[in-house]
């Protein structure tokens, strides 16, 4: 059995939702577009899963409903994993045995959470060990959390998931110890000085940090529940639950040997088109040219998923009118009462500014004589817009001392 569509979006996450919206805006006809997703629900805003969704008051993020897709004649094939792809024949084969053919395919398969087993530790399947990538994970995490009130959680990993989940766990009155191998949290982005601010803030909320070590094994009780976590430094932490956030891998496996891969993703050009002209890739799975850095990058953030998806659809539906994707990388996070934004690239030398004992502070990254990245905590809308604009301009910086003296003012007058 089989069905045929003009456009197929493979994956039903953030990028798929924004691509669908763009298709509708540009006038896709009923029956032309289909989205195939392993998840049983329509595309949703994934970032909410580590924020509002975990908080006692819950999340009220807006999303497009299945009704919206129906009204626009978009076929949603949910709860259905694609198990193989043939880009030469332009077909996808689902686990249900259906062959779906396309004229144009948009790969939006996102990424999967890395498992402890990939680092030689067993026990990921214990009932109180949680990962966080999709709605099912988040629903499970909430239920484990609710059964652990006043208990101990060990959070493995000091990246985005670790930091955001640790904050949510504390708000849910759980004692949290974070364990990660680096010298400071958010090692991929933060300078030691920025990291230290957040670590102190977390400590003031009761979070403990054990840095420079990794977990080696779990103690399990007769029900198969983790009761303690053993670390490489020899220590043992009692645990009523464990949350793991140790990074992701892009879901490229369907296309290995068929499309060119780079930086762990599907390599695309400035129109988000892969090495096969009928296949586009967007979101976490795409490695695309970031014009302002003259480099191919794979970004794992929601803004890039949204914008790359829209750009791909524009390039597909109006190729003549659509230029090269010219993207300014943008990352953000919100935890407790804190909120930061980052634009550009955290390469080169860091210049800090503002009041690190107060509410508003930040940093610039200067690489090869140009400002290439800006970070701001506690800014206003105008200030965030200011650092975004200044970073996009990549201004030449001759005097680092002067930049430091001007601080945020530099971006606001650039
Ligand atoms: P995404 O992962 O959203 O979707 C991929 C979809 O493809 C899934 O539905 C999956 O099931 C499906 N799929 C994969 N393989 C398939 C197959 N073979 N067959 C069928 N379906 C398949 N970013 C940020 O900038 N700010 C933030 O605050 C956050 N917060 C945040 C919280 C949490 C908990 C997570 C996990 C992630 C974030 N992110 C974030 C990152 C952001 O959510 C991420 O960059 C986007 O979701 C990427 O969108 P994609 O559509 O590329 O993948
Ligand atoms: P990450 O890459 O941000 O952090 C991974 C962390 O894992 C590292 O900081 C390190 O401390 C730790 N680690 C690595 N190997 C380890 C090991 N063997 N043992 C223990 N710790 C180890 O990844 P993440 O936090 O898992 O986040 C997953 C994805 O979700 C990322 O793509 C991220 O961008 C996305 N996300 C983004 C946001 C946001 O942008 N605000 C929020 C949540 C999730």
Image (cartoon, rainbow, N blue to C red):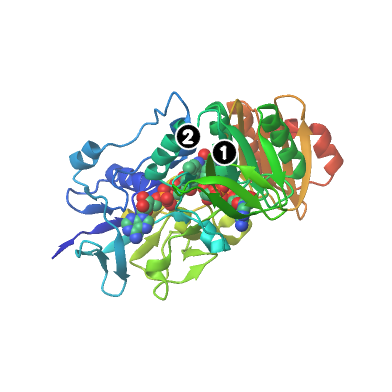
Disc number for residue 145: 2
Give the image quarter of residue 155.
top right
112 relative position to 361: left or right: left
Can you name the residue that lies furthest to the left here? 1
For image coordinates 36% across by 31% down, the residue present is: 62
347 relative position to 328: left or right: right
Looking at the image, can residue 274 be seen? Answer: yes
- Give the mark, 2 or 1, whose residue is nearer the N terminus: 2
For image coordinates 43% across by 32% down, the residue present is: 53
User: Does the CB distance between marks 2 and 1 fall below 8 Å?
Assistant: yes
Residue 371 spot, x, y in % from top left: 72, 46
Residue 199 spot, x, y in % from top left: 70, 36
Tell me the element at label 1. strand
Tell me the element at label 2. helix
Frontmost residue, 22 versus 251: 251
Q: What number of labels is visible?
A: 2
Label 1 sits on residue? 153
Mark 1: few, some, or many residues within 10 Å (few <14, many ≥20)?
A: many
Looking at the image, can residue 302 be seen? Answer: no
Q: Is residue 60 above or below residue 82?
A: above
């Amino acid at each position: 059995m089989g069905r045929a569509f003009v456009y197929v979006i493979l994956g039903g996450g953030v990028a798929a939702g924004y691509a669908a919206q763009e298709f509708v805006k540009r006038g896709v006809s009923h029956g032309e577009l289909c989205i195939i997703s392993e998840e049983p629900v329509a595309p949703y805003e994934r970032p909410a899963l580590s924020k509002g969704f975990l908080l006692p008051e819950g999340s009220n993020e807006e999303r497009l409903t299945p009704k919206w897709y129906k009204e626009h004649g978009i076929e949603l094939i949910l709860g259905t994993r694609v198990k193989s792809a043939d880009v030469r024949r332009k077909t996808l084969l689902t686990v249900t045995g259906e062959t779906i053919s396309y004229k144009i395919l948009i790969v939006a398969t996102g990424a999967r959470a890395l498992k402890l087993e990939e680092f030689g530790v067993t026990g990921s399947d214990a009932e109180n060990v949680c990962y966080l990538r999709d709605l099912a994970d988040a629903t499970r995490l909430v239920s484990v959390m609710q059964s652990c009130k006043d208990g101990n959680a060990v959070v493995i990993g000091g990246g985005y998931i670790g930091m955001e989940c640790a904050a949510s766990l504390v708000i849910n009155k759980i004692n949290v110890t974070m364990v990660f191998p680096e010298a400071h949290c958010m090692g991929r982005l933060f300078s030691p000085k920025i990291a230290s601010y957040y670590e102190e803030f977390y400590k003031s909320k009761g979070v403990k940090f054990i840095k420079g070590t990794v977990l080696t094994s779990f103690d399990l009780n007769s029900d198969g529940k983790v009761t303690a976590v053993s670390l490489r430094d020899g220590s043992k932490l009692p645990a009523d639950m464990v949350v793991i956030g140790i990074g992701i891998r892009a879901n490229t496996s369907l296309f290995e040997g068929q499309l060119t891969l780079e930086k762990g993703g599907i390599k695309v050009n400035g129109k988000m088109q892969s090495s096969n002209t009928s296949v586009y890739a967007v979101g976490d799975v795409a490695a695309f040219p970031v014009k302002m850095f003259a480099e191919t990058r794979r970004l794992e953030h929601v803004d890039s998923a949204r914008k790359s998806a829209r750009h791909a659809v524009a390039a597909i539906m109006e190729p003549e009118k659509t230029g090269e994707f010219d993207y300014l990388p943008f990352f953000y996070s919100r935890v407790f009462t804190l909120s930061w934004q980052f634009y550009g690239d955290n390469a080169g030398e860091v210049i800090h500014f503002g009041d690190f004992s107060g509410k508003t502070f930040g940093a610039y990254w200067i690489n090869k004589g140009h400002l290439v990245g800006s970070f701001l905590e506690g800014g206003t809308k105008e200030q965030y817009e200011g650092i975004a604009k200044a970073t996009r301009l990549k201004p030449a910086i001759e005097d680092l001392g002067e930049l430091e003296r001007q601080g945020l003012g530099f971006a606001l007058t650039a």
